[in-house]
Structure formats: C-alpha cells, structure tokens
Amino acid sequence: MVKKIFISLFVLLTLFLNGSFLSGQENHQLNKNLPELLFFYSESCHACHKARREIMPVIEQEFYRKISIRYLDIANVDNYKLMLSLKQRYNCKDAGVPTVFLEGAVLVGYDGIKDNLRGVIIKTLKEKDL
C-alpha cells in the first residue's frame, strides 16, 4: 500500500516538474497556431552554441507564447534534409549552420541571426496580426 502511494506521488511529481500535467495539451494547442521558428544547428558548431547561449534565450523570453521554436540538430538525417529542402525552396545560397527559418525568412550564421532575428520575428507577428 505504501509502495503504491509512493509510486503515485512520484508519477504526479514527475508530471508536474516536466510541465506535462494538465497544461501539456493546452500548451500544444497554444503553440499549434503560432509562427514556427526552426533553428538548425550542429553540436560541433561553435557559432551554433554561441547563438543558442547568447541570442536564443533573449528571443525565447521576449517572444514567449508569440512564436514556437524548434531546435533541430542536423546530425539527424531528416533534420538535415529538411534544412536543405528549405534552403532550396527559399533560394538560400548560404551554407552552414546555425540557420533559422521563420515564415519564409532565412537567416544563416551567428551574425545574421544576431543582427536580424528580432526584426524578422516582429515583422512576421505584425503580418499575422499577433
């Protein structure tokens, strides 16, 4: 009996701590309609780590619940193929990572992301009236 209570409390605590209890479905519904920013990176890329450490936390905080952000490691073949197909679709000749896509806008490299990402997000939100 004590073991069942302990297991139940552990499961509930785990669900609360990872944010999936009650609000998980709500968060999914909320994020479903938001513009989706795709951030492609490589674990071996210094500029990727720098962008994720210096730029993205500020973006995540400023645009919380206004955009959805997905981080995609290009070590995964499907992610790499997706990045290449998006670069081709949007006629992006710049190679490498980090690369960001948002509603047809493409930014490549640390400096491009640092200098332009905030403006691209604001423009996208204005165009969508969000």
Image (spheres, grey):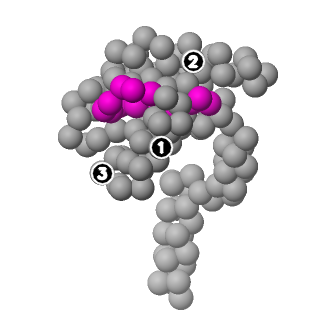
The percent position of residue 7, horizontal first and vertical second, equals 49, 77
- Mark 1 or 2: the one toward you: 1
Q: Residue at x 57, y 52 (%)?
A: 19
Disc 1 is placed on an element classified as helix
Question: In the orientation shown, which residue stands out farthest toward the right?
Answer: 129
Looking at the rendered structure, the secondary structure element under dot 3 is: loop
Q: Which residues are magenta?
A: 92-104
In the drawing, what numbered circle is on residue 120? Answer: 2
Give the label, 3 or 1, closer to the camera: 1
In the image, residue 23 above or below residue 36: below
The amino acid sitting under disc 1 is Ser
Dot 1, crowdedness within 10 Å: few (<14), some or many (≥20)?
Answer: few
Pointer 3 local density, CA inside 10 Å: few below 14, some 14–19, many at least 20: few
Instruction: State yes or no: residue 108 in magenta.
Output: no
What amino acid is found at the position of numbered circle 3 in the picture? Ala
Residue count near mark 2 (Cα–Cα under 10 Å), binned few <14, some 14–19, many ≥20 = some
Quadrant (top left, top right, bottom left, bottom right) of the C terminus: top right
Mark 2 residue type = Val
Between the residue at mark 3 and the residue at mark 1, the CA separation in whole angstroms equals 16 Å
Q: Is residue 21 above or below residue 112?
A: below
Judge whether 66 appears above or below 44 on screen: above
62 or 102, which lies in front?
Answer: 102
Q: Nearer the viewer, residue 124 or 54?
A: 124
Q: Which residue is mark 1?
A: 85
Dot 3 corresponds to which residue?
A: 75
Instruction: Name the one closer to the observer, 24 or 34.
Output: 34
The image quarter containing residue 62 is: top right
